[in-house]
Amino acid sequence: MQQHEWTPGEAFHAAGRAYYGGDPGWAVKKRGERMAHVVYDPSHPNPGETGPRAGHGRNLATWVFCERDGDGEGLFATPLKLVVDSRLEPGAAIGLHRHDDNEELYYVLEGRVTMTTLAPDGRQATATLSAGDAHAVRLGQAHYGVAGPDGARFLVVAIKLVTSPADRRL
């Protein structure tokens, strides 16, 4: 793993720092060393829960692309919300959170992560995923996850809900 300066998540988002420290150009080429490297401790904290649902441990996140409302890069006209290269340390947990305005995809690159998905009607499903496996969270679903003993690395891609033609930039 390359050495980067990791900025704490709260400080990064409070300061409104750039997701990329350069000009990606009209053909959009980005260098990894200029992407934002943010450490979340924990990722998606949920103090109203206990155990892994509360979230604990560190998540080292490299922001590849960001089109979040209010602080996005403005590179794409489609409803892409983000692409993040995420590394959970061994045993770290992503806290329980719901997706009401976007859908999210995880693609596991290294290690293992156990993901639990909760449906709006209360159903839940848990699966342990390894390199090459994928996880999707549909609109209205919630999820949380726990890294295995060697940690886990995965790509996260989120797609925004588009509610009207005015929401589109095309």
Image (cartoon, rainbow, N blue to C red):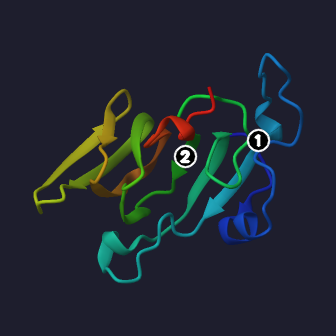
Q: Residue at x 80, y 42 (%)?
A: 20
Q: Is residue 80 visible?
A: no
Label 1 neighbour load within 10 Å: few <14, some 14-19, many 20+: some
Q: Is residue 19 above or below residue 144?
A: above
What residue do we see at 41% from left, 82% from top? 47
Residue at x-position 43% and y-position 43%: 163
Task: Kindly identify the amino acid type of the residue bearing the numbered disc 1.
Answer: Met
163 left or right, relative to 51? right
Considering every residue shown, the one lying at the far bottom of the view is: 48
Q: Secondary structure at mark 2?
A: strand
Name the spot of residue 118 as percent of width and height, x first: 20, 57
Residue type of the residue flagged with mark 2: Ser
Residue 165, how many percent across, how many down? 50, 34
* Residue topped by disc 1: 35
Residue 167: x and y, percent? 55, 41
Label 2 environment density (alpha carbons within 10 Å; few <14, some 14–19, many ≥20): many
Q: Which residue is mark 2?
A: 86
**Cα separation between marks 1 and 2:** 13 Å
Q: Residue furthest top?
A: 27
**Left/right of residue 133 with respect to residue 87 in the rendered view:** left
